[in-house]
Amino acid sequence: MPHILQEVHSDMFAIENLGKRTIPSPITARYFTGEKTRVLYNHHVPGYNEQSMTDGSPLSLECAGPRETIYYDPSQVHAAIVTCGGLCPGINDVIRAIVMALFFRYGVQKVTGIRYGFQGLIPDYGHKLCPLNPELVKDIHTIGGSILASSRGHQDIGIMVNTLIARKINVLFCIGGDGTMRAVELIHREVKKRNKKIALIGIPKTIDNDLSLIDRSFGFDTAISEVVKVIQCGHVESRGAPNGIGLVKIMGRESGFTVAYATLAQNDVNVALIPEAPFNLNGTGGFLDHIEKRLASRGHAVVLVAEGAGQHLCRNCSTVEMDTSGNVRLFNVGVFLKDAIETYFRTKGTEINLKYIDPSYIIRSVPANASDSIYCDLLGQYAVHAGMAGKTAMVVGLYRGEYVHLPLNAVTSRRKLNPQSNLWLRVLEATGQPSFC
Amino acid sequence: MPHILQEVHSDMFAIENLGKRTIPSPITARYFTGEKTRVLYNHHVPGYNEQSMTDGSPLSLECAGPRETIYYDPSQVHAAIVTCGGLCPGINDVIRAIVMALFFRYGVQKVTGIRYGFQGLIPDYGHKLCPLNPELVKDIHTIGGSILASSRGHQDIGIMVNTLIARKINVLFCIGGDGTMRAVELIHREVKKRNKKIALIGIPKTIDNDLSLIDRSFGFDTAISEVVKVIQCGHVESRGAPNGIGLVKIMGRESGFTVAYATLAQNDVNVALIPEAPFNLNGTGGFLDHIEKRLASRGHAVVLVAEGAGQHLCRNCSTVEMDTSGNVRLFNVGVFLKDAIETYFRTKGTEINLKYIDPSYIIRSVPANASDSIYCDLLGQYAVHAGMAGKTAMVVGLYRGEYVHLPLNAVTSRRKLNPQSNLWLRVLEATGQPSFC
Amino acid sequence: MPHILQEVHSDMFAIENLGKRTIPSPITARYFTGEKTRVLYNHHVPGYNEQSMTDGSPLSLECAGPRETIYYDPSQVHAAIVTCGGLCPGINDVIRAIVMALFFRYGVQKVTGIRYGFQGLIPDYGHKLCPLNPELVKDIHTIGGSILASSRGHQDIGIMVNTLIARKINVLFCIGGDGTMRAVELIHREVKKRNKKIALIGIPKTIDNDLSLIDRSFGFDTAISEVVKVIQCGHVESRGAPNGIGLVKIMGRESGFTVAYATLAQNDVNVALIPEAPFNLNGTGGFLDHIEKRLASRGHAVVLVAEGAGQHLCRNCSTVEMDTSGNVRLFNVGVFLKDAIETYFRTKGTEINLKYIDPSYIIRSVPANASDSIYCDLLGQYAVHAGMAGKTAMVVGLYRGEYVHLPLNAVTSRRKLNPQSNLWLRVLEATGQPSFC
Amino acid sequence: MPHILQEVHSDMFAIENLGKRTIPSPITARYFTGEKTRVLYNHHVPGYNEQSMTDGSPLSLECAGPRETIYYDPSQVHAAIVTCGGLCPGINDVIRAIVMALFFRYGVQKVTGIRYGFQGLIPDYGHKLCPLNPELVKDIHTIGGSILASSRGHQDIGIMVNTLIARKINVLFCIGGDGTMRAVELIHREVKKRNKKIALIGIPKTIDNDLSLIDRSFGFDTAISEVVKVIQCGHVESRGAPNGIGLVKIMGRESGFTVAYATLAQNDVNVALIPEAPFNLNGTGGFLDHIEKRLASRGHAVVLVAEGAGQHLCRNCSTVEMDTSGNVRLFNVGVFLKDAIETYFRTKGTEINLKYIDPSYIIRSVPANASDSIYCDLLGQYAVHAGMAGKTAMVVGLYRGEYVHLPLNAVTSRRKLNPQSNLWLRVLEATGQPSFC
């Protein structure tokens, strides 16, 4: 569930329009979504009217959906799709939905796939553009990954805009994470500076489900299903040897939602560790002490740790390294805990059997499950409606069950799991772990 | 997404309380949900304040969650759980969550499972009551069905209340459909008539996902995943023989949500038929004509039909039969269509190969997937919070992403799929089928 | 495990050759299989030398494998593939393996897919031939069914041979059941009569695993996995209601191997019924009596019945009907037992809840599992080696772990499950059922 | 398929008997297996009679199966089960089958589970013995691992035998690998030295499928299925980024059967590396050169490497380390190759995206699939027949489709994948890789 943000201001959910919508929509929708249809930012009582917009009405978000009049003449549209950052279940479903909606609902004939993320907009890389059509994409939802492939890293904004203009691309769909959306923001500014009209529509992607204001990120549901299977393996291994410990490291760079939901879905986790809840390794009540007690009483333990947990434990991490996308390089908490546990018990002369499992890419490269598949289909369609209506510098998202338009900067900040929340409390109850502090 | 109801009145979402809450909650929640915390019935702009409550504030629903003071002394609680009606993925998850929350969050020691639905409250059936505890339920979410078993049919309200009173059961959790909730309403009236205090808490169950005011019914997500697999089989069969037709009948007595979502999740359906969209069998533009054209152009076809679709086609159905639960007996539209198609083409001398698939119980008896598992876990916990707070004659449900309390009658009416909606329109686009009218 | 046949004669495993092998094999095998390499028909002691061939050596079978010299010049080969009869997991794997081996091991350039079974060789049907190559088939093993589609029914042998000759097809691979192999035998005779040289190679297919002399039929392993899932559903349903009965009908027209192995793989079956073990319905010790006792003692029952079981119970079956393939139409034993059970208990006034599950096409249309996939890959390769070596009127098969050549008539008789065997005894022990006789 | 061994001698398959069988078997088998029933060691023509036994008959193996008279009075039997070494799918199925057969077929009442492998026979560890019965084991085949847990490492033979004698255990079933069977051999000698009668029956376990003389090891089929899923993930990842490389390390300490079969089952592997086929890393035609060419031509690559492959590449491995079971510690070839590839391309200034996947414990801790489940069931039953017949110092195994008794030393040597075999040739063809030499 989306958090209510700390700081809000009256026009924070305003969406930019490229211009007047004058062309009757060719689509056969029976209900068009009115441009003024919105959903309240806060639907709680009391609270729903505490923040207001400049016109005095309660703060609200623009609803997504087909508009009765649109900005672009479909015959003039050259749409393009680009996928950036790490893989995530459902990307191909989104690509498929965008292509299908452009062709069959709006009659757009020209859709181009940009290969290897933003690299594909930089001619020097030599990646070819890839024409897309319904025949080509009709079955791609059955395979994982991205048929367009992806890449990380910053590219020159000016050169990318050159390519868009040279290719006469006037609607660009960007599937990517917060880094991608920051790049889209820069592209948007450059396009405006050059007085061009290009609709820039984002479909936010993060397997960590930590987007502010978005109910759930696509692929998260599928990922949890996969993590659950891995936890079962860790559980079986932990019970299969004297003092068995199953240590499973999963995703979660800055937030622990995956760890939390997987723990609730599969009740065999005995210790859950997340970035938001720092823990003591040593000392009474610390992590190692708890593992020791657990082994003494039950003979086995399953530990589920997010890759971003325990970063405070890194002694030699004074300098912060970045990867090509500008993400801080994490120190490997899984291997660190493996060593710490093994050293601890070796010192004590206690035989343990630790099985370390790092499923990594196995989680994220599977095809979307049915639920994510439907969700991605809708995200793709709403993105197309927004693009054809001449919206720009925005993303589509699900907000309290409604599809909405959100400005790009609304999803560039990440949500954290509040360790005081009922969600985390339920995790603690499910695992029976102490606070380790 | 929940519909906005046609008729609303100012106190329609009032929840009944057994009495004053005077006992401090023993649970360790950090945030208790205030009794006055509510969510708006309508969160749209414009619209959110169009209906109002008697105090003039906009119509809203009571939020679920742990209360800081509760009605029952946990040491005095004898809780019971009953499961009624057809099976559905996730029932065991709900049972497990209720037992766990009662024992571990509230310290309740006495929890009883009632076997075989309401039959278990009628001594004449001789079903034994079944004590429940965490050890017994800890792994039940890994198997489908209901460990308590279920039954259909009406039972004597007075005798059931006799049993509740004789057994000193003061909190009863009922997992069941709209028929069950109507029975709970009658039990509630009888209990009041006798001046007894029994908290009656429903957890609404329907695999058809057609509850008014509830975002999605538990088990629906899992069911769609299973239906998708069956459609794939129908697709393979249809392509495996000359003029192959895969005809798949699934659930959906009065609504077509399962058909619609499964069609969107798995894009191989060529014709989708639902109760809400009557169709002509014969004539130009009718169902058979369309199948013939499809075979002529593509050589195969997949038809997905809800069990409640096409009931208007039954010629000899002037008398309405009921089953033991009071549900109208449906005529078998799957077999009817199979015969109609085969006759149609036999008459024309065209060889077809129709493969009729009725997966029936295979869909509903699988264990819940990860997503439903988490959802059921929460429903069970919120039901326990409500019961311990002395709420009664209510169900817990998810409303626009928030867990709420709803009066029993709010879920005894069923939601329909509007054939004018964008949802159905998307289905028509996905299948390419005409309106058949 | 293959039976030892009742009647054997000294040249029963002789394989026909089209002519002298004079062309050096282009393939890069390091070990070629010598033409005289054989495996014993019977490898038991005592027994292995009880039957002998005309030269006095013990009866044996010709080993499959690449020959050092071959009959066909690959540049002159026009190979074709046809799939007949019902679908079965793994057909696409076999097609794929044949195409790959022809192209990459032998350098054959011309491979044609015949659509819709033998219909595809009859010009009047108008089915187009379909050129096959590695690019087209490389991913087909991931989908169920047959990319060439199939059909049932007899076709005119002369016309089919006309087509083969007209198209200059000189190697024909036929994937099909015993009916198909009988047709291949007739094609073979006609081809010989016309003094043509066409290698006719069969890959035997039956989902019932009832081929004499073949260790296991491809797809059987996958089918058992699917049946196991359905039995679990039947088990859950049977336990979910008072006197619950899960009645599951699966394949097995003339043999009960699927029922037997599925029962052993999934230990929840309480009664297993097969064609080879007739049973009394009524009377003490009969089927209905046993169900009644089981319900009385355990409250639920799971019955697994092969479609060909209990045919002796059909009262109005004096005339034997045939389907288009010449198979006897079975009376529907599943529906018959459903009615018989319901009538029996209705008469006695006992409430039961019978859930009838007929998974039918769901079992056979899934993709092959890993084990079947490897097996099909090998069958396809050995078929190609045989065809290139100029073998004809034969099938490839696995015999006691060795791939062999078998004459066509060796697989046109079906194997039965001996109700006196240890296999059936283990089933009886697993279910605890009596003999019903 | 089992190899024909290099060295054979005339009594190499003789099985030791504890004494005369005088007790009529209580089991209800209709066909007992005669003590003289055997299968030929070699069933090829020519070859089957090249090696002979001391009586001049061809070399053969004793068939498994129930004997008409048995050695042990079931009422005097105290059977025990121990599981040693690493986990493997199907262990619980074997345990279940042994318990069921002892109780239901022979009427044995006393069966004990030994916890944590051979540690459980050393009192100092303090592991409790665990009584087993049908009720306890009936559902254990649905979970992975071993309900008895396992351990590695050598234990004192004398103390173990003390425990067996003190506990009056007279039939011991040992599920384990070659190290375990060597220990069983030592136990056997010690037992004989003390003039005791204890039937020692092994059920050989290795997930690497590298047992000489055994058709396939249990769990292998399931493991391949899991590896196939991981390869798919590696394939998706490799295609998802510029110059993507999916590097997957799986089991295979000394043999490459898993790599080979998984490659044949899932055709996306581009390079397969096994212990039996050493490869050059550098130089023209070496591994890195091939990867570079593959990336240049196709843009992505999937590498599947057995953990025991490439050990010759370890520069600092002059001293051989052992783990507690006496297995040589392998150097981590997966991480080594990852580093080597990344360094190679970094030096060349080529961007690559290598995704390293080490699924490790995820493969081996899943429950057995249907096929393995049936196989394990039979292995357990034949082990019980052997033990009750007073056989000792032997294992049960499947040999050319027949269940046989093999002396312990027959399975303590490991099978290798011959890099000159057709199996490896097919792998090379499937991947298109050169010999790297």
Image (tube, coloured by chain):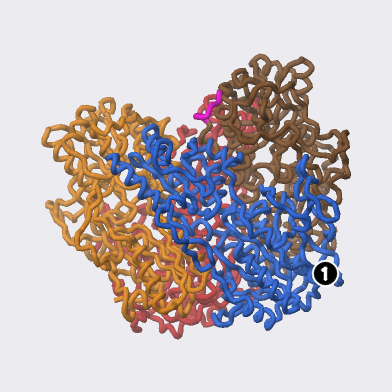
Chain colours: A orange, B red, C brown, D blue
User: In this orientation, which residue lies closer to the viewer: D68 or D437?
Assistant: D437
x%, y% of residue D147?
58, 69
Task: Kindly identify which residue carries mark 1.
Answer: D70
The amino acid sitting under disc 1 is Ile
Q: Residue B331: image x %, image y %?
A: 61, 46
Residue in the picture at 55% in, 47% down: B250
Q: Which residues fall within the magenta stretch?
A: C130-136
Quadrant where the image shows the C terminus of chain C: bottom right
Q: Is residue C131 magenta?
A: yes
Indicate whether residue A126 is drawn in magenta: no
Whether residue B417 is situated above or below residue C82 in the rendered picture:
below
Badge 1 marks a residue whose secondary structure is strand
Q: Point out the residue furthest to the front here.
A: D318
Q: Quadrant of residue D173?
A: bottom right
Rendering coords of residue C375 (x, y %): 63, 42
Left or right: where A303 falls relative to A168? right
Position of residue B6 relative to residue A318, above or below, is: above
**Quarter where residue D61 is shown:** bottom right
**Number of dots carrying numbers:** 1
**Residue A224 in sight here:** no
Q: Nearer the viewer, residue C169 or B209?
A: C169
Residue visible at 33% across and 68% down in the picture: A424
Question: In the rendered image, is residue A97 in sight?
Answer: yes
Measured from the top left, where is residue B110 in percent x and y?
50, 81
Task: Give me the residue at 21% from left, 51% from top.
Answer: A410
Whether residue D400 sits left or right of residue A60 in the image: it is: right
